Amino acid sequence: MCAGVNHVLDGNQTTLALCAVRRVGPVNAAFEGSYGFPNRNFTLALRVGFGFGRNPLSGRPFLGPQGLTSGGAVALRTFADDNANGRLDEGEAPLRGVAFFAGTEEQRSDSDGRAFLGHLGDGNRASIRVDADSMPDIARAPARPGVEIVPRPGRIRVSDFAAVTLSDIEGTVAAHSRSESDEFYLLERQPAGEYGLELDPQQAAMLKTQLVDPLTYTLGGKSSVLRKSIYVKSTK
């Protein structure tokens, strides 16, 4: 809300002015009015400001904050990557409520897994990050923590964020010649993929041990607990 009084000596005219500004979603609306006396002349005005664009993910037009085209923007999509290939395939569900942020701006994905971040500037690298704690399923995590882009005015970058399932690996470590030295190990929240398990080189050298055989394992797209025993032997 703003107000003002203007008095003009020439003609002895006094003008009272009022204005009110309100933001409704992405639209800025300003109402302005003035009244002058003794001539009793008045003005009323309604000013509306907003940005307009087309989301490349949905193909639909949208309204955005005023000045949207002065900097770059990014359209984001997040989904449950069940087969861990990094692509949105048929049957893979979008994820709602996942938080993305760039600087001070934060947006959450809608029911289609889409979010939009604007006002990213012009020419300077912008860092887009995803909040892993906002995942709707604690057994999932983003396949990457974020992405960096170089925004350009009026351009909308598209970026996918796959959410992969996490699994646990557990088992025992057994010395080849001493069964009483068995120890339990647990590797938590491992993403899908193929892995090789190795002993820490410094610790192995200090303990003079090595793996009996190479150890590899594969985690699929579904959350699970994989049990693997590790056998080590002395290098003395």
Image: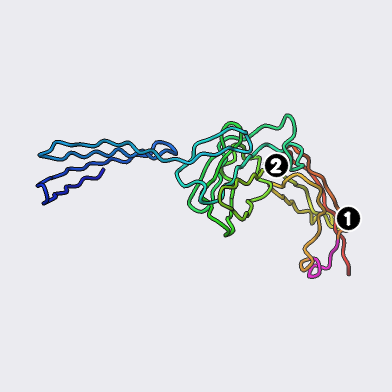
Q: Is 23 positioned to the left or the right of 69 in the image? A: left
Graded by Cα atoms within 10 Å as few (under 14), some (14 to 19) or many (20 or more), the crowding at tag 2 reads many
Residue at x-position 81% and y-position 48%: 194
The magenta segment:
204-210
Q: Is 73 positioned to the left or the right of 222 in the image? A: left
Query: Is residue 208 shown above or below 213?
Result: below
| Disc nearer the start of the sequence (2/1) | 2
Can you give x and y, in whole percent of width and height, for residue 131 in the image? 57, 47
Can you give x and y, in whole percent of width and height, for residue 62 in the image? 53, 35
Q: CA distance from mark 2 to mark 1?
A: 26 Å
Can you give x and y, in whole percent of width and height, for residue 23 in the image? 38, 39
Can you give x and y, in whole percent of width and height, for residue 37 in the image? 12, 40
Which residue is under mark 2?
Answer: 164
Graded by Cα atoms within 10 Å as few (under 14), some (14 to 19) or many (20 or more), the crowding at tag 1 reads few
Which residue is under mark 1?
Answer: 214
Q: Specify the amino acid type for callout 2.
A: Val
Quadrant where the C terminus sits is: bottom right
* Front-most of residues 149 and 103: 149
Q: Residue furthest top?
A: 91
Is 209 part of what is drawn in magenta? yes
